[in-house]
Image: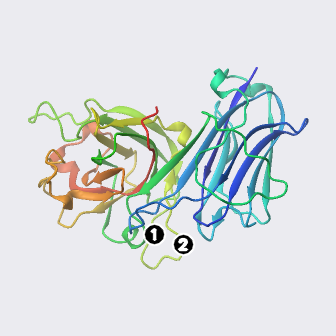
Amino acid sequence: VLISSTTTMKLSRRRTTTSTSSSSATSGTIVLSGGPYTFREMSDRGATSDQYQMIQADTCLERGDYQFVVYDTVGDGICCYYGHGKYALHFTNGREIRPLSSGSFLGQRQETIFQVRSDDLDTVMSERTRPQDATSNVDGDGQKDADEPESPQESESTISLSSFATASGVDLTLGLNKAYGILFNLKLNPDVSSLSIAGMDLYLDTTSHVHYEVWAKPGLWQTVDDEANPNYMKDFYPVSHGTIQGKGLCTPTSTKTCDFATIPIRDFQKVAMLAANIKRLAVYVTLDSDDLIVKDHPGDGSEEGDLFNDGEDEAMDHSLVQASNPAFRVFYGASVLTYPLQVADPATDFRYNKGFLGRIWYRDSAIV
């Protein structure tokens, strides 16, 4: 019987080369390996870019002892002088081998020893994810360490994700408000045919564990059937829910690094955006407490203004665009001052011209 094991790695920005391998501690046989990976510079490096890449690889393991090794050519890991690289290991039954945490280490390798137990054997995977070598298409020209494994052939079980932060630096400390949730829209750029939204990180004013939910639907969040009795929840479907731990609020005088709370990629249902029929995507992100930090658009935020004109006309007022990159645009929306959305009164519980603060993970093709 085989179980599925997943490796997730968020790369740092340093010009270094990172690779990984998983092998049987008994036989020494490599069951999954990848790399070399290097951080890929994005075309947009503006104030709101703060972009990272994520590598996710899946394989199946038999019962036994294993070791997972991260190799780094410079010898300082993937955190924390040039960004905040992290990595994680987990089984599909939910057991974590290593939670998503800092990839800081000294030396050219870091090992994680783990065991596949009998109670882990609850998932039989398809042939696509049977044990095999895997790598990714991330660009890189680094040199291998002497004991670093040879790079195998590409596999479907390994994917590379890009990310886009809607704000960074001083924009995470000024002009902020708190809410339970936020409604906002994404739109593909004209020259992009498709992509998949694969994850989100949230900016939270707490360091405690909180319940979160992410919902999505094609089109605009403002679209309702009955203006007199609007049901803003109509047609939204669940994308992710669970519990995450906040990283806290940054202030202009704070000495700590601003960070977002990460929703595990494994808990996020990928959402396709297609130029042919789903070029706009409505998103609803919420907590069950008012710890979600949102960005103020210039203005008092009390009026709907022109938010309902959200891109039908390509010559729209671009001041409504909160952030953009070469793939898509993120629009200002409405924060929600209660939970759940079904009990919200738009007249008293919506604050318009608010922006989503966080990071959106995506893949440049609509693979779901």
Quarter that holds the N terminus: top right
* 229 left or right, relative to 161: left
Q: Residues within 10 Å of mark 2 (few under 14, many from 20)?
A: few
Residue at numbered disc 2: 256
* 5 left or right, relative to 44: right
Mark pair 1, 2: CA separation: 7 Å
Residue 276, given in percent of the width and then of the height, sits at 28, 33
Dot 1 or dot 2: first in sequence order is 1
Image quadrant assignment for residue 155: top right
* Element on which disc 2 rests: loop
* Element on which disc 1 rests: loop
**Which residue is rendered at x = 52% and y = 57% of the image?**
52
The image shows residue 51, relative to residue 194, as above or below, that is below
Which mark is on residue 250?
1
Q: Residues within 10 Å of mark 1 (few under 14, many from 20)?
A: many
Residue contact at pointers 1 and 2, CB within 8 angstroms = yes
**Which residue is rendered at x = 72% and y = 67% of the image?**
76
Which mark is on residue 334?
none
Residue 336, given in percent of the width and then of the height, sits at 28, 49
Residue positioned most to the left: 228
